[in-house]
Amino acid sequence: MLLTLLVSPPAAAHPHGWVDYRVTLHFDDRERVVALEQAWKMDPFYSLTLTEELARAEGEESMDERLDMLGQEIARNLSRSNYLTHVMHDGEDVALGELRDYTTRLDEQRLEFTFVVPLAEPLALDESPVAWKVYDDTYYIEFLYDEDVAEPIVLRNAPDGCTSRVIAADPDPQKVAEAAALDTDADAPGGLGRFFAETGEATCPAR
């Protein structure tokens, strides 16, 4: 069921669940952005459903081992959809590398998947902000920055003066109506999710 959540089939009321997430933007020693580390916390319903299914599965694996296997499958499926992560700089899409360093665990009964997505090439900001969105293309699942943490965006090893912010989504009322009109038998149009996605942004001063 979690794989369904993260691969996003084209059906069901929209959104059908949510993910609270955090982002850590990694800089290298030459003041370039090199990776986005993400932590996705699934909503309580999906978390409960998944953990109950894992507990009932046949086999002698421990829960930790089953969570590890689930994480492997999630990582493989996300690789087919650009990890639901879209990075932009100077009006251009930024290519991503291969997902790594992923873990799956339970945090206060909620399933959390953490991973690192490197950029294909290090990115010097040169006063131009880097921006990113995390979203399910069909809006089956809504991704929201985690409001229960003090800093949903962290800049690691960033140069002095760099700042970050979350820009709220402002979807057109027609898109809101379109999403609200989708019922359990409807096919969601591709691209709907981006209209509801919050934007993370980081800016660094010129050097």
Image (tube, helix red, strand yellow):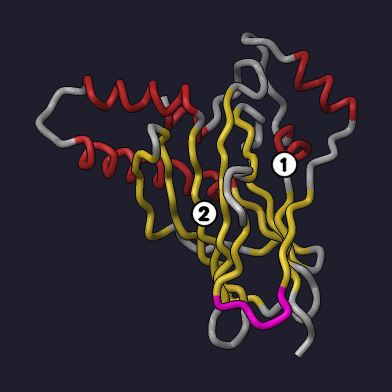
Give the residue drawn at x 62%, y 38%: 143
Identity of the amino acid at label 1? Ala
Q: Quadrant of residue 52?
A: top left
Q: Examine the residues drawn in magenta and state their main secondary structure.
A: loop
Q: Residues within 10 Å of mark 2 (few under 14, many from 20)?
A: many
Q: Which residues are magenta?
A: 157-162
Q: Amino acid at mark 2?
A: Gln
- In the displayed structure, 162 sits above or below 184; it is below
When the figure is inspected, residue 146 is found, relative to residue 140, above or below; the finding is below
In this view, the residue in front, 191 or 171, is: 171
Label 2: element kind: strand
Which residue is rendered at x = 27% and y = 44% of the image?
68
Report which residue position mark 2 lands on.
Answer: 38
Q: CA distance from mark 2 to mark 1?
A: 15 Å
Residue 197, given in percent of the width and then of the height, sits at 72, 41
Which residue corresponds to mark 1?
A: 197
Q: Is residue 77 left or right of residue 187?
A: left
| Residue 29 picture location, percent across and down | 54, 86
